[in-house]
């Protein structure tokens, strides 16, 4: 029962001189959708309409999801995280790459042609 769901895109950010590890997973997506009041079929539209809010929000919940999985606590408030995220070089690219990897992994998308 070691098999990880292939829907997973990992990233690492340095925020406030601290390395934060996140993973865009089904749980991270669930947390984001629930928090933002977005339905699953509206996720792409959510990302495209307001990427300066959507990408850091996805990153925030991806970090929270990983912390929960590791039984750790992430105390930074969402708006504070977003402000720091938007000032961090390479953050947008790192999270965009993680989302793309999770959503285009061949195992995860098998049969979805």
Image (cartoon, grey):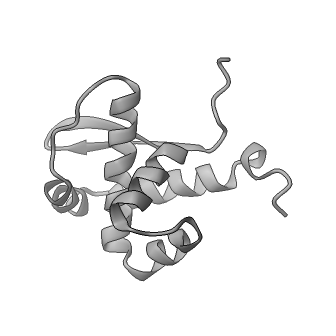
Compared to residue 83, the image places residue 28 above or below, namely: above
Quadrant that contains the C terminus: bottom right
Quadrant position of residue 18: top left
Quadrant that contains the N terminus: top right
What residue is shown at x 20% (from left), y 55% (from top)? 78
Q: Nearer the viewer, residue 34 or 4?
A: 34
Q: Position of residue 91 (x, y in %)?
A: 34, 55
Q: Is residue 26 left or right of residue 52?
A: right
What residue is shown at x 35% (from left), y 66% (from top)? 36
What residue is shown at x 24% (from left), y 57% (from top)? 85
Count of numbered circles in the view: 0
What residue is shown at x 36% (from left), y 52% (from top)? 59
Seen as rendered, the residue at the extreme top is 1
Q: Is residue 25 something that shows in the picture?
A: no
Q: Is residue 110 left or right of residue 35?
A: right
Q: Is residue 85 left or right of residue 37?
A: left
Q: Is residue 39 left or right of residue 86?
A: right
Q: Is residue 85 something that shows in the picture?
A: yes
Q: Position of residue 51 (x, y in %)?
A: 38, 73
Compared to residue 22, the image places residue 34 above or below, namely: below
Q: Position of residue 69 (x, y in %)?
A: 41, 28
Seen as rendered, the residue at the extreme bottom is 49
């Amino acid at each position: 029962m070691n098999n990880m769901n292939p829907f997973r895109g990992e990233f690492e950010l340095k925020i406030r001189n601290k390395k934060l590890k996140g993973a865009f997973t089904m749980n991270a997506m669930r947390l984001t959708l629930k928090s933002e009041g977005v339905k699953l079929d509206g996720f792409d539209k959510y990302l495209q309409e307001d990427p300066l809010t959507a990408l850091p929000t996805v990153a925030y919940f991806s970090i929270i999801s990983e912390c929960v999985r590791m039984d750790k606590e992430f105390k930074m408030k969402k708006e504070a995280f977003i402000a720091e995220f938007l000032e961090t070089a390479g953050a947008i690219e790192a999270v965009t790459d993680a989302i793309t990897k999770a959503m285009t992994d061949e195992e995860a998308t098998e049969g979805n042609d």
